[in-house]
Image (cartoon, grey):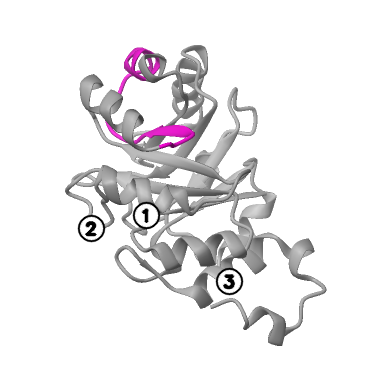
Amino acid sequence: MYVKFCGFTQLSDIHTATQLGVDAVGLVFYPPSPRAVTPMQAKTLSAAVPAFVSVVALVVNMPKDELIELADTVPFDIIQFHGDETPEECEQLASAINKRWIKALRINAEQHTLDSVRAQIDKFAAAGASSILLDAYHQHKYGGTGARFDWSLIPKDSSLPIILAGGLDSENVAATSALPIYAVDVSGGIEQDKGKKDAAKMRGFMKAVKRDRWQNETLSELSNIE
């Protein structure tokens, strides 16, 4: 299982996350979000990310010229479209900066069925997405709500690898091991405040997901990562 920590604003948190073995770090480029960073802040943060750890740029309905400017400033690896972008728009925007991309779908149990979720995923797969991210729907927010959706709506035969987000923390993430997903994405579940991560929560989350990595670690060794 792969792990993405999202919503970084502090350099020290980036260092802690990468020491703990996180697979990807997410930077939010959506000004209304309390976790948003500027391109210059992101440039500093991404410079602290070692090779083989992906930097993901989360954008929400970002215009093409703004996205091109962002890509010229910040050395990110993957775009995460988290707004109302259509498959065609995602494909065109990603092609403009020659980046791989994922699309976040906000799942609403009152509107979605397994078939409708599967059909949406198929459209983004056909447009060239590398993965799909499933998050909880909120009428007024594009993500980062800390809410879970009905996991029975995760299709077992998805045409794209699935990243699960929404309401995850160290207490419940172990339950995702039986789901048809390949990665988990967390923001609020590892924070002490919006945009400020909690080292103990990050450590607990990684330990819950990457049990094989931690099985020979002692509590004293783990406590050295703060």
Instruction: Name the foreground residue: 38 vs 58.
Output: 38
Which residue carries the number 3 mark? 203
| CA–CA distance in space, label 2 to label 1 | 9 Å
Based on the picture, tell me whether residue 80 belongs to the magenta stretch. yes
Q: Residues within 10 Å of mark 3 (few under 14, many from 20)?
A: many
Residue occupying image coordinates x 38% and y 42%: 109
Say whether disc 3 or disc 1 marks the residue closer to the N-terminus: 1
Residue occupying image coordinates x 60% and y 49%: 23
Kind of residue sitting beneath label 2: Pro
Which residue carries the number 1 mark? 7
Asked if 11 appears above or below 28 in the picture, the reply is below
Asked if 170 appears above or below 95 in the picture, the reply is below
Kind of residue sitting beneath label 3: Arg
| CA–CA distance in space, label 3 to label 1 | 16 Å
State if disc 2 and disc 3 touch (CB < 8 Å): no
Residue occupying image coordinates x 54% and y 26%: 130
Check disc 2 and report its element: helix, strand or loop. Answer: loop
Based on the picture, tell me whether residue 126 belongs to the magenta stretch. no
State if disc 1 and disc 3 touch (CB < 8 Å): no
> Looking at the picture, how far across and down is residue 6, in whole percent?
42, 53
Which stretch appears magenta? 75-93
User: Which residue, as the protein is rendered here, is positioned at the far bottom?
Assistant: 220
Q: Residues within 10 Å of mark 2 (few under 14, many from 20)?
A: some
Which residue carries the number 2 mark? 34
Residue occupying image coordinates x 82% and y 74%: 216
| CA–CA distance in space, label 3 to label 2 | 23 Å
Say whether disc 2 or disc 1 marks the residue closer to the N-terminus: 1
Name the quadrant containing residue 154. Answer: top right
> Looking at the picture, how far across and down is residue 142, in whole percent?
27, 43
